[in-house]
Each structure stands twice: as structure tokens, then as C-alpha cells.
């Protein structure tokens, strides 16, 4: 009986509360050199412009497409400055956030909001070209395949929509012109088919290599549309 009472008393005894864990140290942005701040400012500007480009903001569309190249520059620059400053992702992320907020605040207070970003874009685009060179424009054959892939994607989402039909027509026009070029090079029909297959496989492999969250489009579709225009209007 005494052992039972002892067991009950142990079960009902007040359990002391665990000691509170110390609060995490606040995140602080690293001290940056002028060059590092310039690089992060460019990364922030590219992020702003890329966001506006995806939303169709007219002033942003005047710049080269920055969704993919701007993201690459952003990641490369942030990782490098983490290493150079001996800090971490959170600290450099805070520095970037502060720069973005400053740029947005300056734009909000300016009579020419777009001009705030325009003023830094020329040197920043030079940095971008050096760090992430622009890909050469796609060939007619590559454009034919890219537009075929675009047709397949749009068709899967929208069915037989006007956009899907337009993409299918453009892809067919470009494939025909690509085959004309290959014939002019002296390739046989079978050789042209093989080049088409190999090019399609290379593009498919590149697309599959993208991360799941990488939906950036770095294909110069405007160039492809130009190649698909009627010959006399090029």
C-alpha cells in the first residue's frame, strides 16, 4: 500500500518547467565594401525589374529579359558575398532586403520612379553581361522546337485555344524553313530528321535539368517570332 501511495505521489507531483531556451541572436546585415554594395544593389535592381517584367510593366520590358539571367546573377552575387563577409544567407538576405526597400522608397518619393532604377541599370547591365553572358540567339531549328514545346504546354493547359493554334502554326513554319536550310546544306531527309531529333533531345535535356522551382524563360522568343514572319516582311 505504501508503495502504491508513493507511486501516486510521484505521478501527481508538480513537474518543474524546463528552463526557457535563450532567444536567438538577432540577424544583422554584414558590413559591406562599396563594391559589394554596388553588386548587391544590381542584384536587387534585377530582382525588381524581373518581377515587373513578369507582370508586364511597360518600362521594365524595355530591358533585356532578366527573369533567368537576373536570378543567376542574384544567386551568384549573394553566395559570393556570404563567403567574402564570413556571414550567412540570412545576414546577406537582410542586406538585400534593406537595399530593395531603399530603392523602392527612393522611387516612391521621386517624380520619376522608373528613373531611379534606370540610373543604375547601365552599369549593372555591364556587370550582368560579364557575370552571366547572354546566350546567342536560337537558330531556326531551335526556334521551331521551342515553339513546338510552347504549343504542347499551352495546348495541355488550354486545349485547342487560339494561342495554341498560333503556336502550332509558327512551329510548323519554322520547321519547314529549318528543313529548307538543312537541304541547302546538302543534308538528306534522313540526316535532317536526325539533326532535328538530336536538337530536340538536347533541348529536352536542358529543360529537365532545370530546378522544379525554375520557371524562368531565357529563350529569345521575340527572335523566333521574327524568324517566322513572312519572308518579304523580315
Image (tube, rainbow, N blue to C red):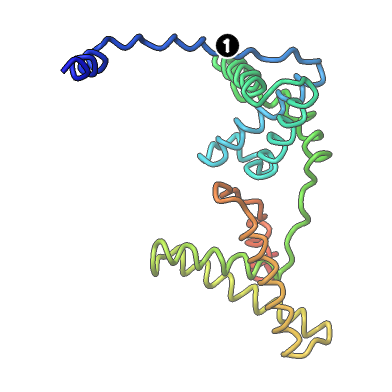
Residue 200 % position (x, y): 66, 72
| Label 1 sits on residue | 26
Q: Which quarter of the figure has residue 70?
A: top right
Q: Which quarter of the figure has residue 132?
A: top right
* Residue 233 located left or right of residue 188: left
Name the residue: 66% across, 55% down: 219
Q: Please determine whether, in this image, residue 171 is positioned above or below residue 39.
A: below
**Callout count:** 1
* Residue 57 located left or right of residue 133: left
Image quadrant holding the N terminus, namely top left
Name the residue: 66% across, 64% down: 205
Name the residue: 43% across, 65% down: 156
Residue 190 % position (x, y): 72, 90
Please tell me how crowded label 1 is: few (under 14), some (14-19), or many (20+) other residues with Cα within 10 Å: few
Query: 110 and 150: which one is in front?
Result: 150
Query: 13 and 105: which one is in front?
Result: 13
Residue 46 % position (x, y): 66, 33
Query: Quick one: which residue is furthest to the left in this view?
Result: 1
SS state under label 1: loop
Q: Please determine whether, in this image, residue 126 is positioned above or below residue 37.
A: below
Image quadrant holding the C terminus, namely bottom right
Residue 185 % position (x, y): 83, 82
Q: Which quarter of the figure has residue 111?
A: top right
Amino acid at each position: 500500500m505504501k508503495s502504491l501511495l508513493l507511486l501516486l505521489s510521484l505521478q501527481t507531483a508538480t513537474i518543474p518547467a524546463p528552463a526557457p531556451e535563450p532567444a536567438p541572436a538577432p540577424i544583422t546585415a554584414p558590413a559591406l565594401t562599396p563594391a559589394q554594395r554596388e553588386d548587391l544593389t544590381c542584384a536587387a535592381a534585377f530582382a525588381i525589374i524581373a518581377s515587373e517584367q513578369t507582370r508586364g510593366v511597360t518600362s521594365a520590358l524595355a530591358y533585356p529579359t532578366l527573369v533567368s539571367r537576373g536570378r543567376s546573377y542574384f544567386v551568384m552575387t549573394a553566395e559570393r558575398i556570404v563567403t567574402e563577409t564570413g556571414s550567412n544567407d540570412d545576414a546577406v538576405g537582410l542586406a538585400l532586403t534593406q537595399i530593395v526597400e531603399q530603392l523602392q522608397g527612393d522611387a516612391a518619393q521621386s517624380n520619376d520612379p522608373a528613373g531611379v532604377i534606370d540610373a543604375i541599370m547601365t552599369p549593372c547591365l555591364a556587370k550582368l553581361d560579364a557575370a552571366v553572358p547572354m546566350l546567342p540567339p536560337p537558330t531556326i531549328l531551335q526556334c521551331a522546337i521551342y515553339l513546338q514545346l510552347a504549343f504542347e504546354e499551352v495546348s495541355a493547359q488550354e486545349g485547342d485555344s487560339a494561342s495554341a493554334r498560333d503556336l502550332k502554326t509558327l512551329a510548323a513554319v519554322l520547321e519547314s524553313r529549318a528543313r529548307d536550310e538543312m537541304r541547302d546544306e546538302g543534308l538528306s531527309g534522313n540526316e535532317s530528321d536526325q539533326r532535328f531529333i538530336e536538337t530536340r533531345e538536347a533541348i529536352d535535356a536542358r529543360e529537365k535539368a532545370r530546378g522544379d522551382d525554375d520557371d524562368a524563360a531565357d529563350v529569345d522568343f521575340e527572335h523566333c517570332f521574327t524568324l517566322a514572319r513572312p519572308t518579304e516582311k523580315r
